[in-house]
Amino acid sequence: MSVAIVERHLFGGTCVNTGCIPTKAMVASAYAAHIAHRARDFGVIIERRPTVDMPGVKARKDAISERSRTGVEKTLRSLPRCDVYVGHARLTSARDVAVGDQVLTGDRIFLNVGGRAAVPPMPGLDDVPFLTNSSMMDLDVLPRHLLIVGGSYVGLEFGQMFRRFGSEVTIIEMAPRLVQHEDSEISSAIQEVLGAEGIHVRLNARCIRLSGREGGVIAHVDCEEGSPAIEGTHLLLAVGREPNTDDLGLDAAGVARDQRGYITVNDRLETTVPGIWALGDCNGKGAFTHTAYNDFEIVASNLLDGAARGVSDRIPAYALYIDPPLGRAGLTEAEARRRGHAVMVGKRPMTRVGRAIEKGETNGLMKIVVDAQSQEILGAAVFGTGGDEAIHCVLDMMYAKAPYPVLSRAMHIHPTVSELIPTLLEELTASAG
């Protein structure tokens, strides 16, 4: 088939340029700084106090991101029967796409336009400078005091990394706990980890208002505890994402969107117009690189292989890349009970995981939830060293639809974090909530 690829700006999208790859490169630098400061805990003496070179951190991050971006572009441009166009694409009909003065016509159109940081109409925001996850990538100085509005993935990852670089950090969250959709125990453990590193957390922050003066920004909050005014030098907005669908010409093609701007799709990711599909962040079915890639697999299998795959086949899974990382698969305990399951729960603190003790990284806990009648594994969280990898033991079992005894009887390698997952299942107890 002949294919046209249209890219407006940087190849690789959010993940390569302002998301996964550059932020995890910075997380790695922050981890190195953290371990350097803890060197004595491991019997290693560093004569001079380690310092962080922020231009060096940025240069390393930029180089890693650029390698990935140029690799993506080179691959696309070298594909046979693939034409690459650079510019802003807009639908002019259900089969036509305008890119500048050119009009491309095709029987199949795939929209994979991603999203951007949401900027809510917060009082005073127009009067103060602020950063988003994208503009943070351009920062090569160390903020004296970084204020972060938002206590989920973006806010927590940037908060911990800049605290480890040497900034004072305050995270402001409107909800009563961090990562509100997680298990309450996991949220509490995350807050304990961040608090132990000196990060200030302000919860139940209602009526957030912003003001500024030279060299700083002030967040005015109505909280149950703490000062009503928090003064910082830099402000990061980390309050969610919105899809890049407002300037695509969707109306001209008859493609429907929902109230939040996400393109309406069915289980096969088909839009309301035959011959047009929507993949990735813009369809509201997932906000991760792995969900976007799975979208591609679903559409390609249905179109090219004659398979019958759908979004409903997949199990929710994600990782939060603070240190230690959180790996999540499936339902939380609260979600499982809301869906009517009688549940059994297994828990283990990382202080009782040999691998974590050996590494000197015993923060966090492991938790797994099982249906008491069917023995189906409903969900799990591994918040601890290696949690982003260990969670796949559970995830793969869930996809195999294997009852939990299959995993509980498996022989895992010692010493690992994963070897304690069968132990979790051997220690299940009934939970009434």
Image (cartoon, helix red, strand yellow):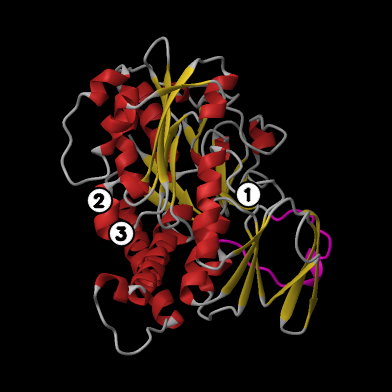
- Give the quarter of the image for residue 414: top left
Give the residue drawn at x 61%, y 47%. Answer: 244
Give the residue drawn at x 25%, y 25%. Answer: 407
Q: Which mark is residue 57?
A: none
Q: Residue 4 at x, y = what percent?
A: 42, 44
Residue 183, visible in the rendered structure: yes
Q: Residue 324 at x, y = what percent?
A: 40, 54
Report the amino acid beneath label 2: Arg
Quadrant placement of the N terminus: top left
Q: CA distance from mark 3 to mark 2?
A: 36 Å
Residue at mark 2: 355
- Which of label 2 and label 1 is nearer to you? 2
Q: CA distance from mark 1 to mark 3?
A: 29 Å
Report the amino acid beneath label 1: Gly
Can you say whether 210 is above or below 260 in the image?
Answer: below
- Which of label 3 and label 2 is nearer to you? 2
Q: Main secondary structure of the magenta part?
A: loop
Residue at mark 1: 240
Number of residues whose C-alpha sits closer than 10 Å to that of mark 3, classed few (under 14), some (14–19) or many (20 or more): some
Residue at mark 3: 71
Number of residues whose C-alpha sits closer than 10 Å to that of mark 2, classed few (under 14), some (14–19) or many (20 or more): many
Which element type, helix, strand or loop, lies under badge 2? helix
Whether residue 35 sits left or right of residue 328 in the image: it is left
Residue closest to the eye, 300 or 276? 300
Residues drawn in magenta: 119-133
